Image (spheres, helix red, strand yellow):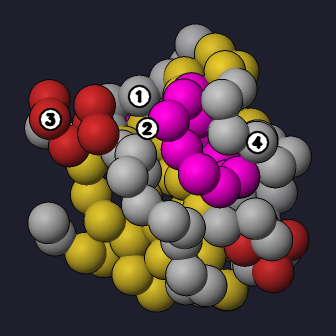
């Protein structure tokens, strides 16, 4: 799996130091299932994606829903395992993060992120 750094361009902060990219059928289907957690600084980018679930997951996550211009459309509160997240129709991709990563990076709706 390819890993990238995610930076909040608007705030000048790091959102994740090591984000995996799930952009194939299997990697998107699997997502974070089978993992015991996300370490601080880790994340998963799922592309394309406009909704998520936490079925079969063992830990809560926070999710950033992103538009095609890399702007944050929605930042969720922690989503517990075995839940269905929101559908954000304009979202092109999501970033799944450990709980607390959104506030630690001061990321808010409207912020522009970059990764690579």
Quadrant containing the C terminus is bottom left
User: Which x, y percent locates residue 9?
Assistant: 60, 74
Please tell me which residue is depicted at 75% across the width and 78% down the height of the picture. Answer: 105
Residue 52 falls left or right of residue 13: left
Q: Earlier in the sequence, mark 3 or mark 4?
A: 3
Q: On screen, 112 above or below 14?
A: above
Residue 4 falls left or right of residue 51: left
Q: Secondary structure at mark 3?
A: helix
Q: Earlier in the sequence, mark 4 or mark 2?
A: 4
Q: Secondary structure at mark 2?
A: strand
Mark 3 — residue?
Answer: 26
Badge 3 local density, few (<14 within 10 Å), some, or many (20+)?
A: few
Residue 55 is a magenta residue: yes
Res 47 quadrant in image: top left
The numbered dot on residue 49 is 1
The numbered dot on residue 83 is none
Residue 110 visible to the viewer: no
The numbered dot on residue 93 is 2
Spatial CA distance of label 4 from label 1 is: 19 Å
User: Which x, y percent locates residue 17?
Assistant: 46, 86
Mark 4 — residue?
Answer: 80
Residue range highlighted in magenta? 53-68
- Between circles 3 and 4, the one closer to the viewer is 4
Q: Earlier in the sequence, mark 1 or mark 2?
A: 1
């Amino acid at each position: 799996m390819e890993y990238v750094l995610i930076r909040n361009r608007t705030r000048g902060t790091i959102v994740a130091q090591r984000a995996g990219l799930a952009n194939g059928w299997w990697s998107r289907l699997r997502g974070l299932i089978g993992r015991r957690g996300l370490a601080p600084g880790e994340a998963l980018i799922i592309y394309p994606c406009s909704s998520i679930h936490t079925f079969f997951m063992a830990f809560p996550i926070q999710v950033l829903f992103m538009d095609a211009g890399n702007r944050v459309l929605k930042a969720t509160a922690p989503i517990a395992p075995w839940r269905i997240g929101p559908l954000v129709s304009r979202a092109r991709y999501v970033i799944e993060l450990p709980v607390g990563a959104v506030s630690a990076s001061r990321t808010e709706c409207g912020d522009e992120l970059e990764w690579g």
